[in-house]
Amino acid sequence: MAQREYTTKSKKAIKLFEEALKYYSAKRNAEALEILEKAIKADENFVEAYTVSGDCYADVGDFQNAIASYQKVVDLDPDFLSTSYKQLADVQFKTGDYESALSNYKVFMTKKRVNPQIREKAERYMKNAEFGAVVKKKPVPFEPKNLGESVNTDQYEYFPVLTADEQTLVFTRNQRSQRGDYQEDFYVSIASEDGSWARARNLGEPINTSDNEGAQTITADGQQLFFIGCNRKSGKGSCDIYHAFRNGSKWGMPRNIGSPANTSKWESQPSVSADGKTLYFASNRSGGAGGMDIWVTQLAPNNEWTVPRNLGDKINTPFSEETPFIHPDGKTLYFTSNGHVGMGEKDIYVTRKDADGNWSEPKNLGYPINTWNDEQGLFVAASGENAYFSSDRKGGYGKLDLYSFKLYEEARPTRVTYVKGKVKDKETGRPLGAKFELIDLATSEVVIESSSDQIDGKFLVTLPVDHEYALNVSKDNYLFYSEHFSLPKQQDITKPYRMDVELQPIKFGEKVVLKNIFFETASFELLPESTVELDKLVAFMNNNSTIHIEIGGHTDNVGKPESNQLLSENRSKSVRQYLIDHAISEGRIQFKGYGEEQPVDTNETPEGRAKNRRTEFKVLSGE
């Protein structure tokens, strides 16, 4: 700018301006602005001084004064610089004045001799301004509430994640350390009975170290933690994904999840599915659409992570997509992007996966969830009602605070609830770590495969409502346990479905009701949804190869006793035949029909009769 002929003849103004340029080049904007103000007083039509003043104000985020300066430039000389209208539009956009920004972008697009890259960027922002002008007039419900001083400090709190029951909150805090630098660590807070949060405490070793840890995600039951560690000896690149298990109240040693998930590039911001078997993350690894992309990897049967797959151009753009969050429904993904049409630098979007695995067109969450600022890091609770995020908005306790708000209906995920319980020894009451499966009875698909905690026996899983499920629980030296239940469409998603399991040690004479074996009405033909439980019984017999059992069939008292006797006998015979067909020696399996002789409940009610219609197996011997 100093090489051209100035728009002023005032030597005083020029001298002051050139002095200000030196301060501006040294990034000393405050001093530069002070001198520029004097230059403008020397000549109020000095266009160059207004231009650099606008640059100074824009650099420090004082957009209102930047607007005033750039507006003066185009008022004094509309053709002074080909980019003047774009500079004005850019800062108007950053204040949310989309209509003025759109108008000035359009003027800029008429200018000739404009750098093609600058023109391309202006076209993109013009589309954003057009979108913002429309969306801002149709605000969505949004009333954020600060999580309070027990969680937030005068420092930085961000990346909130919660367990499915919304009782445990884990977040990243970035604060000045004793060394004088800033240190990122994880903190945890437990919900109080009155709904407030207890004083957050440092998660401690071995998760937190003297290095930085951040961008954490936890499974729905709070038993697994994934997070980012950077510049570590065990790292594959600058930042890698690490994983740790919890037993009781203690966390195990984190380990790098390794290749091919981690590379020499930057992997960050993981989000784990409710069951811990699918991991979404952001990375600038090769093979992407450009900038940061969202990728997904899955846990293979050998407990290694598969080669990550790019989510494709429906989600990823040539710009950057980050902070993915996969909801416990397994098909609703929230993420941030500066490549899709939006209202600011980074907006939050939602996309949904269909039955074929295809993602829908991302939808902007709208204003005022998204603004002209940089929004990211959204977490949506399992209930789908409450969302959490970090913000530097006015009225907080510090630089970044954690907030919650009620997510409006159209942006919510599929309704899910959670099943919560404890596994224990039936005789001693001792908590047990046991394997369990949850099966969708309509499809026979195993939707959850996990374990209860080894120390306290507790488990927590999330499940979509409006389904019927089978539960199978097993542990060595115990009879396996089965149950079935339904989660109706109107299930209260704020309250858990409670299910405590008592496992019976293997003893001769003990019985187990096979609650997930089903027959056609008044028939001994097994229904397909019985297969999962029958296969569990096959596995039990194989794992306990010396055991002999009796399959017992029972009915209610509806109908003729002799008919019920025959039906119960044929049903027990059908189960026996399934075991024989699956390589269990017929000499190990007896069968007997008891008809209506051994009810376990009243036959006077539908519920009682349902309990009386059952198939059992009894341990006869171990010889």
Image: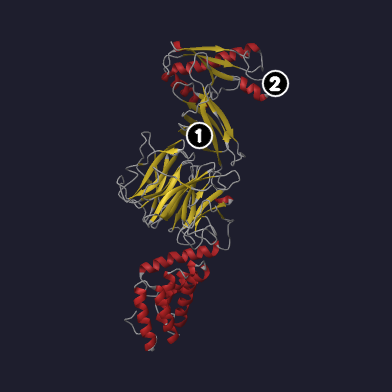
Q: Residues within 10 Å of mark 2 (few under 14, many from 20)?
A: few
Tag 1: residue type?
Phe
SS at circle 1: strand
Question: As rendered, which of 203 and 617 lies closer to the eye?
Answer: 203
SS at circle 2: loop
The residue that mark 2 highlights is 604
Left or right of 300? Residue 138 is right
Q: Position of residue 456 (x, y in %)?
A: 49, 32
Q: Position of residue 10 (x, y in %)?
A: 39, 89
Q: Position of residue 534 (x, y in %)?
A: 48, 22
The residue that mark 1 highlights is 459
Q: Against 33, is 438 above or below?
A: above
- Earlier along the polypeptide chain: callout 2 or callout 1? 1
Q: Against 431, is 1 above or below?
A: below
Tag 2: residue type?
Glu
Say which quarter of the image contains residue 14.
bottom left
* Residue 164 seen in the figure: yes
Label of residue 405 in the image = none
Q: Residue at x 45, y 76 (%)?
A: 70
